[in-house]
Image (tube, rainbow, N blue to C red):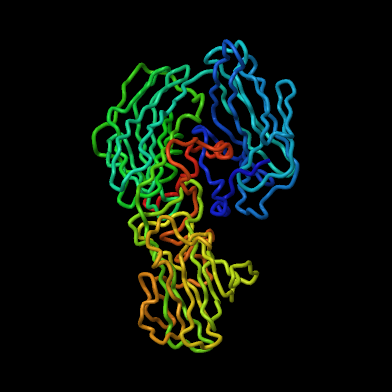
Amino acid sequence: MRRLFLPAAGRRSATALAVAGLFAGAVLTAAPAHADGPVFTLGGPAEVGLRPYPATGKPQPTTVDVTVNNPSEDVENGDFDGEYTVTFDLSALAGVADVKFGDTGSSNCKITGTTGVCTDYGVWAGLSSVAELKVSAAKGSKLGSTGDIKVSGTAEGATFTPFTTKVTVGGPDLVMKPLNLKADVKPGQAQRAPITFANAGTSAAGDVLLTLMYSHGIEIPERFSNCEYSQGAGEDFEHAYSTAICALEGPFEPGAVYELEKPFTVQAAGHAFIEDFIYRVNEDSPKERAAQRAGAAFTPGTGGVLGVKKQAAPARSADLDPWNNQQEQGIRAKNTADFAAYGVSVEKAAVGETVKAGIGFRNQGPAWIGYLRSGESIGVVDVKIPEGAKVTAKPKSCNGVTASGGERDKQLGAPRYICEVGSVVLEDADFALPFELTIEKVVADATGTVTVRNWHEPEPALQFDPNMANNTAKLVLNGKDSGTTTGGTSGGSTTGGSTGGSTGGDSPQSTGGTAAGSATTGGGTAEGGLASTGSTALLTASAAAVALAAGGVLFVAVRRRRATTGA
């Protein structure tokens, strides 16, 4: 069994698995009431379209990942340890489709006749894969022929909610064409995006939804009346994308290519740097609309209607290949960001006194920095503690190390701290790191440093920062001249207070950083650094598996949580 998705309590620490759904029709059936013991929900796509059996060669299979959801929020102790059995009733597929188990996550599975059986031990908290099915059209099957796969489960001391997926031979296949926009641009530069898609399937598609997702440094000015828009705040990965969803009237005939009557404008903002532009098309349905919205608040456009050519009305069926519904364009603006460290100077701190030191850095722009693909940390803040002081409270994003940077078991009282920045820093972010220091010995003009730098200490320069001169500031205790600036863009003197950040000690980081190392206004963990630009592959295999019970869309780790402005 492969764990695919953690319950809410563990999602922030599992950003590598934080992906949205693969098939828009994925479902999780409601659990029965009054069940004894835990209730686990089997899931997968609500419907599956198959490529017709070819005149020559082998049929092309479609992968169906069957999942089980353990609703426990307790990641550490919420697992079910008993044996369980999942049964696949394939009898309705006779003459319609052939089924076999795939190589991934199906080692304990076997098909006998028209029944498949998987046995295993343990159902982890959250979403896990039960088995991978390879489904292909049967020889002699006709277009439009259909049948159901019924999945049920049993275990002593637990209940499984069954589910059914509908399998149909043939159907539409919406294919998004790549735009091939310029990958290297200047801030403020605009490009026209004449989005084009085709139906490469065997039957017509009905109305469709065109969805655009674009990162914080991209602006799209058009506000068509048949589109709705959600503005991302951008302060962390979950909010780094804005979304436009446009309802386009069909039908869209098989073999035809369609282009928008009016192209969108993709403009690099003044704070643009490494950006992402994602565009996809799906058949319209209430489930699909809900999946694309992902709980965020949307505002309808007030401009003209965005249209395409119309054809005769068809019946709707499953997309034959959801993998080609989406394209992604990387854009890099020629821009820079100036990270300026700030420290603090504390006057007349006595032995036994605890002082609060708000240190950190500010992004003086003009660019924001967001590593939205790799999720890599942008850098670290390296804090060296002044002589005579002991750290008694620290941000959770900061790890205590030895003076030389080696590992250290005790986190309080360390001579040095390495604080992870995270993968998103906005153009006006203040990355505050509140420390508390207890004076053990009065040392006149005791000085430490605050440095924002690259992860690799021997090469500290941040590639996007042209002004490394202000990347280090001073942290001074009992300074001789407490009124002088200690570095960066702030400093000055304070007694028992902070400069540039609020206090917080060892509490959860509402002001300093999350457990993943990101400040409220500048941090975040996500899909990050743009290793290369241009069109990219759509999804990883692991991302696809998660989707089957999420009921979402094919965006890779770019779905944001509910917007603060709406439900």
Q: Quadrant of residue 194?
A: top left
Along the viewing direction, whichever of 188 and 54 lies nearer the viewer: 188
Relative to residue 470, is residue 81 drawn left or right?
right
Picture layout, residue 40 above or below residue 72:
above
Relative to residue 154, is residue 346 drawn left or right?
left
**Residue 543 picture location, percent across and down:** 55, 40
Relative to residue 75, is residue 490 drawn left or right?
left
At 52% from the left edge and 43% from the top edge, which residue is drawn? 19
At 36% from the left edge and 45% from the top edge, which residue is drawn? 230
Picture layout, residue 492 above or below residue 139:
below
Picture layout, residue 390 above or below residue 525:
below
Picture layout, residue 79 above or below residue 547:
below
Q: Quadrant of residue 181?
A: top left
Q: How many marks?
A: 0
Along the viewing direction, whichever of 33 and 544 lies nearer the viewer: 544
Q: Quadrant of residue 535?
A: top left
Along the viewing direction, whichever of 130 and 256 lies nearer the viewer: 256
At 39% from the left edge and 52% from the top edge, which residue is drawn? 234
* Outermost left residue: 303
**Residue 469 picture location, percent across and down:** 39, 67
**Residue 489 picture location, percent across and down:** 35, 70
Q: The N terminus lies in which quarter of the figure?
A: top right
**Residue 329 picture location, percent across and down:** 41, 38
At 37% from the left edge and 32% from the top edge, which residue is drawn? 179
